Amino acid sequence: RYLKSKYYLNYSSVKFFIIYYILLSIFAILRIFWNVLPDTSDSFLFLSIAEEIERGENVKIFGSHVYGNFIYVIKTLTFNNYYTILFLNIFIFIIALVDLMSIIPQSNRNRYRIWFGFLLIYPSIYWFIPNVVREAIFIFCIVNILCQSVNIIQNKITFKYVCLLVFYCSITVILRPQTLPVLFIWLLFLSCRQNIKYGILVMIIGLLFLNTNYVQQEIVQKVSFGYLEAFKTEATSSISKIAYKELIIPRNLKELFMLFPYLIFRFLFSPFPWELSNLQYTFAFVDAILIIILFLVLGWMTIKGLVWNWDIVLFSFLFIFVMGVFEIAFTGAVRHRMPYILILSSLLLKFPFKKYNLTLYNQHC
Protein backbone atom coordinates (compact mmCIF):
# COMPACT_ATOMS: atom_id res chain seq x y z
CA ARG A 1 0.00 0.00 0.00
CA TYR A 2 2.89 2.36 0.81
CA LEU A 3 4.56 1.78 -2.57
CA LYS A 4 1.30 2.18 -4.45
CA SER A 5 0.44 5.47 -2.73
CA LYS A 6 3.88 7.12 -2.72
CA TYR A 7 5.22 6.04 -6.11
CA TYR A 8 1.91 5.45 -7.92
CA LEU A 9 2.88 1.87 -8.69
CA ASN A 10 0.20 -0.47 -9.92
CA TYR A 11 -0.48 -3.80 -8.28
CA SER A 12 1.58 -5.75 -10.83
CA SER A 13 4.67 -3.60 -10.18
CA VAL A 14 4.38 -3.98 -6.42
CA LYS A 15 3.95 -7.73 -6.81
CA PHE A 16 7.03 -7.92 -9.06
CA PHE A 17 9.27 -6.09 -6.57
CA ILE A 18 8.12 -8.33 -3.72
CA ILE A 19 8.75 -11.47 -5.78
CA TYR A 20 12.08 -10.04 -6.96
CA TYR A 21 13.18 -9.48 -3.36
CA ILE A 22 12.27 -13.08 -2.51
CA LEU A 23 14.14 -14.36 -5.59
CA LEU A 24 17.32 -12.44 -4.75
CA SER A 25 17.05 -13.58 -1.13
CA ILE A 26 16.87 -17.20 -2.26
CA PHE A 27 19.96 -16.62 -4.38
CA ALA A 28 21.68 -15.07 -1.35
CA ILE A 29 20.94 -18.22 0.67
CA LEU A 30 22.35 -20.38 -2.12
CA ARG A 31 25.54 -18.30 -2.13
CA ILE A 32 25.92 -18.78 1.61
CA PHE A 33 26.06 -22.57 1.28
CA TRP A 34 27.48 -23.01 -2.24
CA ASN A 35 30.27 -21.15 -3.98
CA VAL A 36 28.35 -20.72 -7.23
CA LEU A 37 30.05 -17.47 -8.28
CA PRO A 38 33.62 -16.12 -8.01
CA ASP A 39 34.49 -14.32 -4.79
CA THR A 40 35.01 -10.56 -4.90
CA SER A 41 38.26 -9.35 -3.35
CA ASP A 42 36.56 -6.23 -2.01
CA SER A 43 34.27 -8.38 0.14
CA PHE A 44 37.27 -9.66 2.10
CA LEU A 45 38.61 -6.10 2.29
CA PHE A 46 35.38 -4.77 3.80
CA LEU A 47 35.17 -7.64 6.29
CA SER A 48 38.77 -7.09 7.37
CA ILE A 49 38.11 -3.36 7.80
CA ALA A 50 35.09 -4.19 10.00
CA GLU A 51 37.33 -6.40 12.16
CA GLU A 52 39.89 -3.60 12.45
CA ILE A 53 37.16 -1.19 13.54
CA GLU A 54 36.00 -3.72 16.13
CA ARG A 55 39.54 -3.70 17.56
CA GLY A 56 39.57 0.11 17.49
CA GLU A 57 42.14 0.30 14.70
CA ASN A 58 42.29 2.35 11.50
CA VAL A 59 38.91 4.11 11.80
CA LYS A 60 38.24 6.39 8.80
CA ILE A 61 35.14 7.98 7.25
CA PHE A 62 35.89 7.85 3.52
CA GLY A 63 35.99 5.24 0.78
CA SER A 64 36.04 1.55 1.60
CA HIS A 65 36.21 2.29 5.32
CA VAL A 66 32.70 3.74 5.21
CA TYR A 67 31.25 0.41 4.11
CA GLY A 68 33.47 -1.30 6.68
CA ASN A 69 31.83 0.89 9.33
CA PHE A 70 28.43 -0.08 7.96
CA ILE A 71 29.29 -3.79 8.22
CA TYR A 72 30.53 -3.30 11.78
CA VAL A 73 27.28 -1.61 12.81
CA ILE A 74 25.13 -4.34 11.24
CA LYS A 75 27.33 -7.01 12.80
CA THR A 76 26.93 -5.42 16.23
CA LEU A 77 23.15 -5.03 15.93
CA THR A 78 22.64 -8.60 14.71
CA PHE A 79 25.03 -10.32 17.15
CA ASN A 80 27.80 -11.09 14.63
CA ASN A 81 25.44 -12.21 11.86
CA TYR A 82 27.21 -11.12 8.66
CA TYR A 83 24.56 -12.72 6.47
CA THR A 84 22.09 -9.99 7.43
CA ILE A 85 24.10 -7.65 5.21
CA LEU A 86 23.15 -9.67 2.11
CA PHE A 87 19.42 -9.29 2.72
CA LEU A 88 19.78 -5.63 3.70
CA ASN A 89 21.68 -4.96 0.46
CA ILE A 90 18.84 -6.58 -1.49
CA PHE A 91 16.27 -4.42 0.29
CA ILE A 92 18.23 -1.23 -0.42
CA PHE A 93 18.59 -2.27 -4.07
CA ILE A 94 14.83 -2.85 -4.45
CA ILE A 95 14.14 0.61 -2.98
CA ALA A 96 16.60 2.08 -5.51
CA LEU A 97 14.68 0.45 -8.38
CA VAL A 98 11.40 1.78 -7.02
CA ASP A 99 12.93 5.26 -6.76
CA LEU A 100 14.12 4.96 -10.37
CA MET A 101 10.56 4.21 -11.45
CA SER A 102 9.41 7.44 -9.79
CA ILE A 103 10.96 9.56 -12.58
CA ILE A 104 9.37 7.50 -15.32
CA PRO A 105 6.27 9.16 -16.83
CA GLN A 106 3.02 7.36 -16.11
CA SER A 107 2.42 6.93 -19.84
CA ASN A 108 5.61 4.85 -20.17
CA ARG A 109 4.87 2.44 -17.34
CA ASN A 110 2.46 0.36 -19.40
CA ARG A 111 5.50 -1.38 -20.88
CA TYR A 112 7.14 -2.22 -17.56
CA ARG A 113 7.27 -5.95 -18.36
CA ILE A 114 10.25 -5.65 -20.69
CA TRP A 115 12.24 -3.71 -18.06
CA PHE A 116 11.30 -6.18 -15.35
CA GLY A 117 12.37 -8.97 -17.69
CA PHE A 118 15.77 -7.31 -18.10
CA LEU A 119 16.17 -7.06 -14.33
CA LEU A 120 15.39 -10.76 -13.96
CA ILE A 121 18.09 -11.89 -16.40
CA TYR A 122 20.82 -9.29 -15.71
CA PRO A 123 23.66 -11.44 -14.28
CA SER A 124 25.51 -8.68 -12.38
CA ILE A 125 22.58 -8.22 -10.04
CA TYR A 126 22.88 -11.81 -8.82
CA TRP A 127 26.65 -11.47 -8.53
CA PHE A 128 27.02 -8.18 -6.66
CA ILE A 129 23.76 -7.37 -4.85
CA PRO A 130 23.53 -10.46 -2.57
CA ASN A 131 27.17 -9.84 -1.65
CA VAL A 132 29.28 -7.98 0.92
CA VAL A 133 30.05 -5.04 -1.36
CA ARG A 134 28.82 -1.44 -1.41
CA GLU A 135 27.09 -1.64 -4.80
CA ALA A 136 23.52 -1.60 -3.43
CA ILE A 137 24.06 1.56 -1.37
CA PHE A 138 25.98 3.21 -4.21
CA ILE A 139 23.20 2.43 -6.70
CA PHE A 140 20.63 3.82 -4.26
CA CYS A 141 22.58 7.10 -3.98
CA ILE A 142 23.30 7.43 -7.72
CA VAL A 143 19.65 6.77 -8.60
CA ASN A 144 18.48 9.40 -6.13
CA ILE A 145 20.99 11.94 -7.47
CA LEU A 146 19.42 11.40 -10.88
CA CYS A 147 15.89 11.57 -9.45
CA GLN A 148 16.49 14.89 -7.71
CA SER A 149 18.24 16.24 -10.82
CA VAL A 150 15.24 15.31 -12.98
CA ASN A 151 12.92 16.96 -10.44
CA ILE A 152 14.95 20.17 -10.71
CA ILE A 153 15.05 20.02 -14.53
CA GLN A 154 11.35 19.29 -14.97
CA ASN A 155 10.08 21.57 -12.22
CA LYS A 156 12.30 24.17 -10.65
CA ILE A 157 15.02 24.55 -8.04
CA THR A 158 13.50 24.23 -4.59
CA PHE A 159 15.10 24.02 -1.16
CA LYS A 160 13.90 20.43 -0.76
CA TYR A 161 15.35 19.21 -4.07
CA VAL A 162 18.68 20.99 -3.50
CA CYS A 163 19.05 19.59 0.03
CA LEU A 164 18.30 16.04 -1.12
CA LEU A 165 20.65 16.41 -4.09
CA VAL A 166 23.50 17.65 -1.87
CA PHE A 167 22.81 14.88 0.65
CA TYR A 168 22.96 12.05 -1.88
CA CYS A 169 26.01 13.55 -3.61
CA SER A 170 27.77 13.75 -0.24
CA ILE A 171 27.02 10.10 0.59
CA THR A 172 28.20 9.05 -2.88
CA VAL A 173 31.51 10.91 -2.51
CA ILE A 174 32.00 9.46 0.98
CA LEU A 175 31.43 5.96 -0.43
CA ARG A 176 33.59 6.50 -3.52
CA PRO A 177 35.68 9.72 -3.35
CA GLN A 178 36.76 9.28 -6.99
CA THR A 179 33.24 10.24 -8.09
CA LEU A 180 33.71 13.82 -6.86
CA PRO A 181 35.00 15.31 -10.17
CA VAL A 182 32.23 13.62 -12.16
CA LEU A 183 29.53 14.82 -9.76
CA PHE A 184 30.97 18.33 -9.84
CA ILE A 185 30.74 18.40 -13.64
CA TRP A 186 27.15 17.12 -13.46
CA LEU A 187 26.13 19.68 -10.82
CA LEU A 188 27.76 22.47 -12.83
CA PHE A 189 25.85 21.39 -15.95
CA LEU A 190 22.61 21.07 -13.99
CA SER A 191 22.92 24.51 -12.35
CA CYS A 192 23.95 26.30 -15.56
CA ARG A 193 20.99 24.72 -17.31
CA GLN A 194 18.66 26.35 -14.83
CA ASN A 195 20.39 29.70 -14.50
CA ILE A 196 23.93 30.89 -15.23
CA LYS A 197 24.01 32.51 -11.78
CA TYR A 198 23.52 29.13 -10.15
CA GLY A 199 26.36 27.80 -12.29
CA ILE A 200 28.70 30.53 -11.07
CA LEU A 201 27.72 29.75 -7.47
CA VAL A 202 28.47 26.03 -7.95
CA MET A 203 31.81 26.92 -9.56
CA ILE A 204 32.79 29.10 -6.59
CA ILE A 205 31.84 26.36 -4.12
CA GLY A 206 33.83 23.86 -6.17
CA LEU A 207 36.93 26.08 -6.15
CA LEU A 208 36.66 26.38 -2.36
CA PHE A 209 36.56 22.59 -2.07
CA LEU A 210 39.66 22.33 -4.25
CA ASN A 211 41.65 24.12 -1.56
CA THR A 212 40.86 21.55 1.14
CA ASN A 213 43.69 19.20 2.07
CA TYR A 214 41.69 16.02 1.45
CA VAL A 215 40.59 17.01 -2.07
CA GLN A 216 44.13 18.11 -2.92
CA GLN A 217 45.66 14.82 -1.76
CA GLU A 218 43.00 12.35 -2.86
CA ILE A 219 41.65 13.96 -6.04
CA VAL A 220 43.66 16.84 -7.54
CA GLN A 221 47.11 15.25 -7.23
CA LYS A 222 45.81 12.06 -8.86
CA VAL A 223 44.52 13.81 -11.97
CA SER A 224 47.63 13.17 -14.05
CA PHE A 225 48.91 10.69 -16.61
CA GLY A 226 51.75 9.79 -14.27
CA TYR A 227 49.33 8.70 -11.56
CA LEU A 228 47.20 6.82 -14.10
CA GLU A 229 50.25 4.83 -15.22
CA ALA A 230 51.37 4.09 -11.65
CA PHE A 231 47.86 3.11 -10.58
CA LYS A 232 47.24 0.73 -13.47
CA THR A 233 50.68 -0.88 -13.27
CA GLU A 234 50.58 -1.49 -9.53
CA ALA A 235 46.95 -2.58 -9.36
CA THR A 236 47.22 -4.97 -12.31
CA SER A 237 50.13 -6.86 -10.76
CA SER A 238 48.00 -7.85 -7.75
CA ILE A 239 45.02 -9.17 -9.76
CA SER A 240 46.71 -10.80 -12.75
CA LYS A 241 44.01 -13.51 -13.14
CA ILE A 242 41.20 -11.02 -13.75
CA ALA A 243 43.12 -8.06 -15.15
CA TYR A 244 42.87 -7.09 -18.79
CA LYS A 245 45.41 -8.92 -20.91
CA GLU A 246 46.41 -5.67 -22.56
CA LEU A 247 47.38 -2.86 -20.21
CA ILE A 248 46.50 0.37 -22.03
CA ILE A 249 47.97 3.52 -20.49
CA PRO A 250 47.60 6.84 -22.34
CA ARG A 251 50.56 9.11 -21.57
CA ASN A 252 49.27 12.39 -22.99
CA LEU A 253 46.07 14.01 -24.21
CA LYS A 254 46.63 12.93 -27.81
CA GLU A 255 46.94 9.26 -26.82
CA LEU A 256 43.96 9.61 -24.50
CA PHE A 257 41.72 10.87 -27.32
CA MET A 258 42.96 8.15 -29.66
CA LEU A 259 42.51 5.33 -27.13
CA PHE A 260 39.34 6.70 -25.55
CA PRO A 261 36.79 4.92 -27.84
CA TYR A 262 38.41 1.51 -27.30
CA LEU A 263 38.70 2.02 -23.52
CA ILE A 264 34.98 2.81 -23.31
CA PHE A 265 34.10 -0.11 -25.59
CA ARG A 266 36.17 -2.48 -23.45
CA PHE A 267 34.64 -1.15 -20.25
CA LEU A 268 31.09 -1.66 -21.52
CA PHE A 269 31.39 -4.99 -23.32
CA SER A 270 34.14 -6.99 -21.62
CA PRO A 271 34.99 -9.69 -20.76
CA PHE A 272 35.82 -11.05 -24.17
CA PRO A 273 35.96 -14.85 -24.60
CA TRP A 274 39.79 -14.98 -24.63
CA GLU A 275 39.95 -13.20 -21.24
CA LEU A 276 38.13 -15.94 -19.30
CA SER A 277 40.65 -17.80 -17.14
CA ASN A 278 38.03 -19.65 -15.08
CA LEU A 279 34.70 -21.24 -15.98
CA GLN A 280 33.10 -19.34 -13.11
CA TYR A 281 33.70 -16.12 -15.05
CA THR A 282 31.39 -17.36 -17.81
CA PHE A 283 28.75 -15.55 -15.78
CA ALA A 284 30.54 -12.29 -16.61
CA PHE A 285 30.66 -13.20 -20.31
CA VAL A 286 26.87 -13.72 -20.32
CA ASP A 287 26.61 -10.29 -18.70
CA ALA A 288 28.62 -8.78 -21.58
CA ILE A 289 26.41 -10.46 -24.21
CA LEU A 290 23.29 -9.09 -22.53
CA ILE A 291 24.73 -5.56 -22.51
CA ILE A 292 25.58 -5.83 -26.22
CA ILE A 293 21.94 -6.75 -26.88
CA LEU A 294 20.77 -3.88 -24.65
CA PHE A 295 22.87 -1.33 -26.55
CA LEU A 296 21.67 -2.65 -29.90
CA VAL A 297 18.09 -2.19 -28.71
CA LEU A 298 18.82 1.28 -27.29
CA GLY A 299 20.57 2.21 -30.55
CA TRP A 300 17.48 1.18 -32.53
CA MET A 301 15.26 3.14 -30.12
CA THR A 302 17.47 6.20 -30.62
CA ILE A 303 17.08 5.98 -34.39
CA LYS A 304 13.30 5.67 -33.98
CA GLY A 305 13.18 8.63 -31.58
CA LEU A 306 12.00 6.52 -28.64
CA VAL A 307 14.48 7.77 -26.03
CA TRP A 308 12.15 9.46 -23.56
CA ASN A 309 14.81 11.23 -21.44
CA TRP A 310 18.25 12.23 -22.73
CA ASP A 311 19.31 13.42 -19.28
CA ILE A 312 19.44 9.76 -18.24
CA VAL A 313 21.82 9.05 -21.14
CA LEU A 314 24.05 12.04 -20.39
CA PHE A 315 24.19 11.30 -16.67
CA SER A 316 25.11 7.65 -17.20
CA PHE A 317 27.75 8.20 -19.87
CA LEU A 318 29.43 10.94 -17.86
CA PHE A 319 30.38 8.26 -15.33
CA ILE A 320 31.04 5.59 -17.96
CA PHE A 321 33.55 7.82 -19.76
CA VAL A 322 35.63 8.33 -16.61
CA MET A 323 35.33 4.75 -15.33
CA GLY A 324 36.39 3.35 -18.69
CA VAL A 325 39.72 5.18 -18.63
CA PHE A 326 40.71 3.92 -15.17
CA GLU A 327 39.35 0.35 -15.27
CA ILE A 328 42.00 -2.40 -15.06
CA ALA A 329 40.03 -5.68 -14.79
CA PHE A 330 37.05 -7.21 -16.59
CA THR A 331 35.41 -8.21 -13.29
CA GLY A 332 35.79 -4.61 -12.14
CA ALA A 333 34.20 -3.43 -15.38
CA VAL A 334 31.23 -5.77 -14.89
CA ARG A 335 30.71 -4.44 -11.39
CA HIS A 336 31.43 -0.75 -11.92
CA ARG A 337 29.25 -0.36 -15.01
CA MET A 338 26.26 -2.00 -13.35
CA PRO A 339 24.73 1.16 -11.75
CA TYR A 340 24.73 3.01 -15.07
CA ILE A 341 23.53 0.03 -17.09
CA LEU A 342 20.59 -0.27 -14.70
CA ILE A 343 19.77 3.42 -15.15
CA LEU A 344 20.07 3.18 -18.96
CA SER A 345 17.88 0.06 -18.96
CA SER A 346 14.96 2.15 -17.66
CA LEU A 347 14.78 3.58 -21.20
CA LEU A 348 13.35 0.20 -22.23
CA LEU A 349 10.07 1.32 -20.70
CA LYS A 350 9.34 3.07 -23.99
CA PHE A 351 10.21 0.06 -26.12
CA PRO A 352 7.30 -0.79 -28.47
CA PHE A 353 7.32 -4.54 -27.91
CA LYS A 354 4.28 -4.86 -30.17
CA LYS A 355 4.06 -3.62 -33.73
CA TYR A 356 0.68 -2.18 -32.87
CA ASN A 357 2.23 0.01 -30.18
CA LEU A 358 4.88 1.32 -32.60
CA THR A 359 2.22 2.18 -35.16
CA LEU A 360 0.23 4.12 -32.57
CA TYR A 361 3.40 5.92 -31.45
CA ASN A 362 4.25 7.01 -35.01
CA GLN A 363 0.68 8.21 -35.58
CA HIS A 364 0.80 10.20 -32.34
CA CYS A 365 4.09 11.84 -33.36
Image (spheres, rainbow, N blue to C red):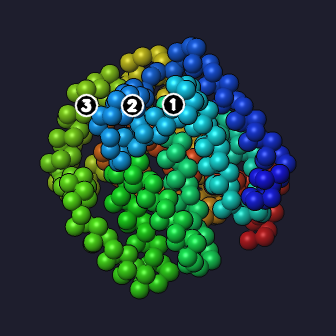
Please state which of residues 44 and 24 is positioned toward the viewer in this rendering.
Answer: 44
Please state which of residues 239 and 169 is positioned toward the viewer in this rendering.
Answer: 169
Residue at the location (66% across, 29% down)? 25
| CB atoms of marks 1 and 2 within 8 Å | yes
**Which amino acid, mark 3?**
Thr
> For residue 135, which numbered disc appears in the image?
none
Q: The C terminus appears in which quarter of the rendering?
A: bottom right
Q: Earlier in the sequence, mark 2 or mark 3?
A: 2
Mark whose residue sits in front, 2 or 3:
2
* Residue assigned mark 3: 236
**Which amino acid, mark 1?**
Lys
Residue 274 locus on image (x, y percent): 38, 23
Mark whose residue sits in front, 3 or 1:
1
Q: Residues within 10 Å of mark 2 (few under 14, many from 20)?
A: some
* Residue assigned mark 1: 75
Residue 200 in the image: above or below residue 169: below
Please state which of residues 226 and 157 is positioned toward the viewer in this rendering.
Answer: 157
| CB atoms of marks 3 and 1 within 8 Å | no
Q: Earlier in the sequence, mark 1 or mark 2?
A: 2
**Which amino acid, mark 2?**
Glu
Query: Is residue 35 in view from this perspective?
Result: yes
* Residue assigned mark 2: 54
Residue 227 locus on image (x, y percent): 18, 47
| Mark pair 2, 3: CA separation | 31 Å
| Mark pair 3, 1: CA separation | 32 Å
